[in-house]
Amino acid sequence: MTVGILGGGQLARMIALAGIPLGQEFIVLDPSAEAGAVRLSRLLQGAYDDPALLEKMAQQASIVTYEFENVPASAAEYLTAHTTIYPPAKALQTAQDRLVEKQHFQSLGIQTAPFAAVDNLNDLTQAMSSIGYPAILKSRRMGYDGKGQVVIQSAGELADAWQAMQDAPSIVEGFIPFQREVSIIAVRRANGDTVFYPLSENTHKGGILRVAHCQADDPQQIAAENYVSKLMESLDYVGTIALELFDVNGQLIANEFAPRVHNSGHWTIEGSETSQFENHLRAILDLPLGSTQSVGYSAMVNFIGDVPPEASVLAIPHAHLHLYDKLPRKGRKVAHATIRCDDERQFNDSLNALHALATQFDDS
Ligand code: AMP
């Protein structure tokens, strides 16, 4: 069977790596001939909304999925009409707009930060009387890795903050004084079968994920599973999903979800019996889902901007390196490494060593 993927970056590459043993072939649509998945798939090179390329995709792929949520609406509509696209278009539409997303959480009884829609400076000024300082102003669309966001500390910063948004429809949110950020990754099949991975505790710097650490027996596991179950059911979800949450004094507050495989689940390649990538394929191909049982302790560290020499990563006991075939560039995720180990002390030693190495090469 041929699986089509919109986007040919590292997520598509890891989906293909998981799918080849299952006998799948891949075709990716990406503007770049150097995209990370092209070694493992056929490439349709061009714009995501190019009608001729979408037609080819619909003809050549039995099922289409995507590795990023900013898929143009016209592409999602075309593929929905001409083939099967999973996760369903409704999940994309909800995740693409931070306001729609937060309203959707609210309608399901999923806690969020206080928020308000902002289309001009007047809206922003009025909203702040109920939201309070500090707050974060975010563009409703096309934001990722902290891009299109401004923190507002006081009323004197409102005009500059609004100007920075360049009139983009926005949302203002109360700043959540969280103790930690976590995400839950879950996978649902069309018949409703669902599996959950253990929570991942995530550390960000400059809005970019740095470390994702698998949490065994986390006290918030069940609460997170309840939230993500409601979310998946409401969207008739099929595939892997990631729900990002703030933990504030033991209470979970939803920040956003990604209707796709997610960076905070890369440790599942070595750290789980079945990875998020393989389970994504099993779900969209309507195959039985695999066990999400953890295999020892695991955590992942991203390499941002540049990658250390392979030998220095692989010299760390229990390290597994994943290169993305991407050219070094400031702030760009170019590779990651996972530590997986049965012994807790050895695991911590290796994770500390990997973290120190990644920090040394981190250019941001
Ligand atoms: P986002 O693009 O919404 O994932 O935001 C990127 C990062 O900014 C998050 O991972 C948090 O570290 C931080 N952040 C976003 N929204 C809030 C909020 N309402 N309160 C506190 N921190 C936030």
Image (cartoon, rainbow, N blue to C red):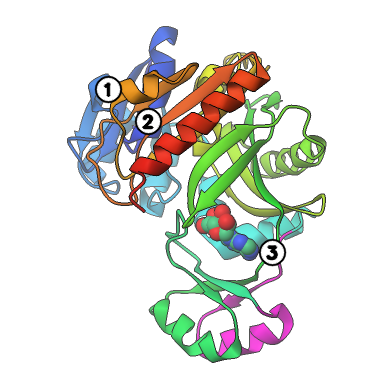
Residue 132 forms part of the magenta stretch: yes
Q: Tell which circle, 2 or 3, labels the residue nearer the N-terminal end.
A: 2
Query: What number of labels is visible?
Result: 3
Give above or below for 296 relative to 309.
above
Give above or below for 222 relative to 131.
above
Please tell me in which quadrant of the rendered image residue 360 appears: top left
Q: Residue 12: which numbered mark, if any?
A: 2
Few, some or many residues within 10 Å of mark 3 (<14, 14–19, 20+): some
Asked whether residue 52 appears in the rendered view, the answer is yes
Q: Tell which circle, 1 or 3, labels the residue nearer the N-terminal end.
A: 1
Asked whether residue 280 appears in the rendered view, the answer is no
Q: Is residue 192 left or right of residue 361?
A: right
Asked whether disc 2 touches disc 1, contact meaning CB atoms under 8 Å apart, the reply is yes
Question: Which residue occupies the foreground of this view, 213 or 31?
Answer: 213
Q: Tell which circle, 2 or 1, labels the residue nearer the N-terminal end.
A: 2
Determine the CA span between mark 2 and mark 1. Answer: 9 Å
Which quadrant holds the N terminus?
top left
Image point (37%, 52%), residue name: 74
Give above or below for 149 relative to 133.
above
**x and y, in percent, of residue 106 in the image:** 74, 59
Q: Is residue 236 left or right of residue 146?
A: right
Label 1's element? Answer: loop
* Amino acid on which the number 1 mark rests in the picture: Ser
Residue 115 forms part of the magenta stretch: yes
Q: Nearer the viewer, mark 2 or mark 3?
A: 3
Tell me the residue that label 3 is attached to: 176
Few, some or many residues within 10 Å of mark 1 (<14, 14–19, 20+): many
**Whereabouts is ligand 1, in terms of quadrant?**
bottom right
* Amino acid on which the number 2 mark rests in the picture: Ala
Q: Residue 41: which numbered mark, if any?
A: 1
Boundaries of the magenta span: 112-133
